[in-house]
Amino acid sequence: METAARAEWPDTRLQRCLAHVQRDTRRDLTMHPGSQAGRELRKLSLKPARVRTAEQAAQWAEALNAWHERWRGLVSERTTAKQDPGNPKALAGRKWWWTHERLRRSYKRFEKLFRDGRLFAYLDPRLLEGGPVPDTTNRLEGGVNSPIKRILVNHRGMGEARMMRACEYECFMRSPGPDLKALLEAHETRERTRASAKAQQERESEQHTGDEPTAGSGVDWNELHASTPYPNNTD
């Protein structure tokens, strides 16, 4: 989705859904991490959702940086295949891996989002000129995605092409001033183009390919038939 958004609106700021960030962190660290570093990072991961000012965002970033300074060695720790030859990663051919991979991934996720300006983009004064900016995709999940999912569930027998068309129709009808006639005309044009291309392909496949037998390369009748009658001594 992010790749599509970048391609369509390259100059638009992106805000990562904080609810999804928390969910991803919870999946990596679990609700009750076993290490002290994990417990501290888990506690930090719950705070972005309560950040409402740029000052609070800066304080949170300082706390994250302080956490990394305390646990830099742990986050950077590696395990080699020689140290743990029975590990599935070693058996898969890897020479080394991060010892605390989930902890490192959780930290790197926050660090990259903050560095790219996608963690607290909703606090940007330039964006706030047009009104409040949401920090989650809850409205999208409940207002747009849920009806699309219901369509696919209620019409499970549709083929892939029809499912795509149904989803397109649902999204189109939620756009400002939807023109159903224009949508249907676009579909008809697309179908005619697809049918024309298919017919052209079939015509080309039926044309002369140059593989027909020529003189001296065809089937010889005498090679398949004996010059004398086949002996039949059965009664």
Image: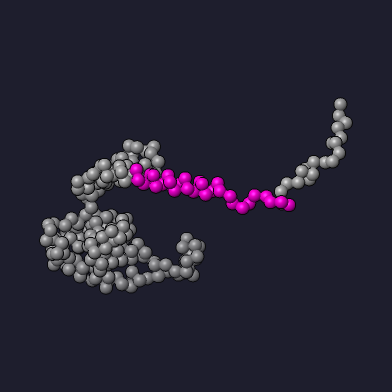
Of the pair 73 and 142, the residue shown nearer to us: 142
Residue 90 image position (x, y, % from top left): 48, 64
Task: Report x, y in % for residue 178.
Answer: 22, 45
Q: Quadrant of the N terminus?
A: bottom left
Residue segment shown in magenta: 188-216
Which residue sits furthest right?
Answer: 233
Vertical placement of residue 65 versus 179, above or below: below
**Residue found 27% across the figure and 55% down from its top:** 20
Instruction: Check the image and report above or below for 120 versus 208.
Output: below
Tell me the colour scheme of the image. one colour
Q: Is residue 72 above or below residue 159?
A: below
Give the camera-side residue of 97 and 142.
142
Q: Residue furthest front?
A: 215
Q: Position of residue 53 (x, y in %)?
A: 13, 63
Classified by dominant secondary structure, the portion drawn in magenta counts as helix
Quadrant containing the C terminus in the rendered view: top right
Task: Tell how many labels.
Answer: 0
Residue 81 horizontal side relative to residue 23, left or right: right
- The answer to whether residue 141 is visible is yes
Is 86 in the magenta?
Answer: no
**Residue at left offset 52%, top offset 49%:** 204
Left or right: where does residue 221 sit relative to residue 120?
right
Q: Residue at x 22, y 47 (%)?
A: 175
Percent across and percent down for residue 133 are 16, 57
x 42%, y 67%: residue: 97
Quadrant housing residue 132? bottom left
Residue 67 appears anywhere in the view: no
Q: Nearer the viewer, residue 119 or 128?
A: 128
